[in-house]
Amino acid sequence: MSGAEFVPLSLTPILIGIFAAIACALPGNFLVLRRQALIGDAISHVVLPGIVVAFLLTGAVTAWPMMLGAAGAALISVVLIEAIRRLGRIETGAAMGVVFTAMFAAGVLLLERSDTSSVHLDVEHALMGNLESLIWLEATGWRSLLDPQALAGLPPELPRLALVLALVIAFTWVFWRPLKISTFDEGFAQVLGMRTDLLGIALVMIAAIAAVAAFDAVGSIIVIAMFICPPAAARLMTDDLARQVGWSVVFATLSAILGYVFAGYGPLWLGGSDSVSAAGMIATVSGLILALAALFGPRRRGMMA
Amino acid sequence: MLFEALTLQLGYNATLVAIGAMLLGISAGATGTFLFLRKRALVSDAISHATLPGIGLAFIVMVWLGMDGRSLPGLLIGSALSAWIGLLCVQWLTGGTRLSEDSAIGAVLSVFFGAGIVLLTVIQGMSAGRQAGLDSLLLGSTAGMLFSDAVLIAGGGALVLMLTLLLRRPMSLVAFDSDFAAASGLNVQRIDLATMGLVLAVTVVGLKIVGLILIVALLIIPPVTARFWTERTEHVWLIAGALGGASGYIGAAISASAPALPTGPIIVLVAFAFFAVSLLFSPARGVLSSVLRHRQYQRRVHLRQGLLALAQGQPIYEGYTLRLLQREGLARPDGVATGDGQARAAKALLDEKRWEILRGLQAHEATAARYDGLTGLETILTEDQLRDLDTRIAAPREIAP
């Protein structure tokens, strides 16, 4: 395929897919180790009421209010889960189930009750995203990457996700040691004087930011899959946290690229004519990688000699 | 309109849907109880999301065989098969690798759902316009439901409910204490599997009414709500069933009463309303009652400490204690005890002294453990025992000049 076709049509979706996948996989590593993997699931469900409320307040589908609404909803859900867990003395899983289903139901109801026929806002879009439509029409080939005029036409999701990815990387980098210690031995971390509770909240907030930014571009399915599948597969490859994070980044990147390529060109290879959902395919590929790791990963059964 | 809906006067289909939703709610609440008590509530989330690829495949296969792809029985069979595979994957990932159950659940639900979305887009390309029926299974839709589908759902709900009733004894044993159940000769694994089978059946039956994203709410919210009202396993599932049934029935009725009120979300929100009320107002574990209990306890402690201070002639600086003593008529605003106060204070001091003596006696070791600084000893010991204790309190002695 020539650059003239690849750069405008496929480069930006692939890059956005990769950025979203890595931004979710990085905090996912710690969530998986802390047995909080389903926080990602909960957050991506409650994003829907957040964006619907933001839409109702502003009356337009614009990025920043919606991201604020989604982040607000994520925050409310985390607080609610914690409150229900403590006040009702209910285990976390059930408390999460109560909160995210109720908030999602409220989101769907709001969406049905309000007039959104004029704008592109529906449940399917929230689930699947629209990765395929994030094309870069101004580009004419590889040389456009150096052309400021063409660069101005980049889909705004790309710089936004790049920013969030940078934030996530910075967070992981700066708090690497506290995160590592408090994940494996919370008591020891407290003895060292770390505020493990604040760190836990910060981790969830970072995960929520990554989820909301990725959700905007790629839909909630990829978000849940990328929080869990690459880190889980990486965990079956190694006992070393740094290597695990490395593997998870590799797996996330691989899922994004392969998933996009299979979705766009797979049906053509099989004789079909239409492409299939890239978001769904990326999630599927990440699942296949996890399955392979679970079958052949060197550390699939835990500590062995 | 709502009244007509609640009294089943909105036509045959709406009536069947309401009854079906009620049966579904009862069985979901009862079945979910056993999941919740086993602390595996979110496994149902993986099961429900894992139905999607089965629905897609069933559609494709049925079209390929020349049948109508939207036939509900076929779609439900497909969804049950793929949900079963998803459940096996969760168990394989949890048992065969070192991943924890929550990671396995998240992985299965996202990957199966992703694969399902891929299949839906394949179907979209396959024969335009015929996919419309499948979208409705995501969020449930009872509008324009076929009569045969409504019968299927009502019948399925009744069947699941019957199975739940049949299996409730072994399931509650396992949920309450799996070790004990194993020791009394029950096959815990098989019963867990049966529970999962029931969850799967609830999910499949609920696809058309509530939709696969929200069906997990019917399995989780009623049991959690029921837990606020009782401490007994056999009551939890009864209450959960009743709450689930009520949510299903009321939700379906509300949704039938006006346009643009999707059935699934309304049912879930009704269930959540029950939950919110219970969280706030349940007598045993509710927020309001625990606030009241805490206030009462605080009051007793302050009163007791205030009385002891009065008895020993110490000044009271704590404002709340002082106000409390005044309100009870035990002290004057300047902190000096009234006659009543002096009597109660002497009694409190006597109590403390009695406890002090009691703690030194081996024979009363078990009683001594109940000391909390609030209880009067006469509510625990008999009069004889008290008299015996009192003989040990040293009598006032004359002080030699």
Image: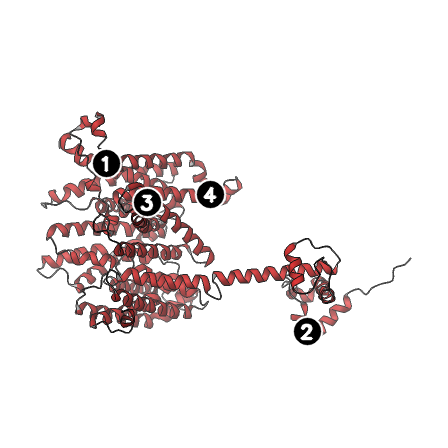
> Would residue A61 be found to the left or right of residue A28 on screen?
left
Q: Estimate the spatial distance between the alpha carbons at disc 4 and disc 2, rounded to whole Å.
A: 53 Å
The answer to whether dots 2 and 1 both sit on one chain is: no
Using a 10 Å C-alpha cutoff, classify the residue at mark 2 as few (fewer than 14 neighbours), some (14 to 19) or many (20 or more): few
- Is residue A147 depicted above or below A168 in this figure? above
Between A290 and B35, which is closer to the camera in this rendering? B35
For the residues marked 1 and 4, what is the alpha-carbon distance in whole angstroms? 35 Å
Task: Name the colouring of the figure.
Answer: secondary structure
Instruction: State the residue at coordinates (80%, 64%).
Output: B394
- What is the x, y in percent for residue B190? 33, 64
Residues marked 1 and 3, same chain: yes
Which label is found at residue A155? 1
Q: Chain of mark 2?
A: B
- Quarter where residue B384 is shown: bottom right
**Amino acid of disc 4:** Leu
Name the element at disc 2. Answer: loop
Secondary structure under tag 1 reads loop
Disc 3: which residue: A227
Residue for badge 2:
B382
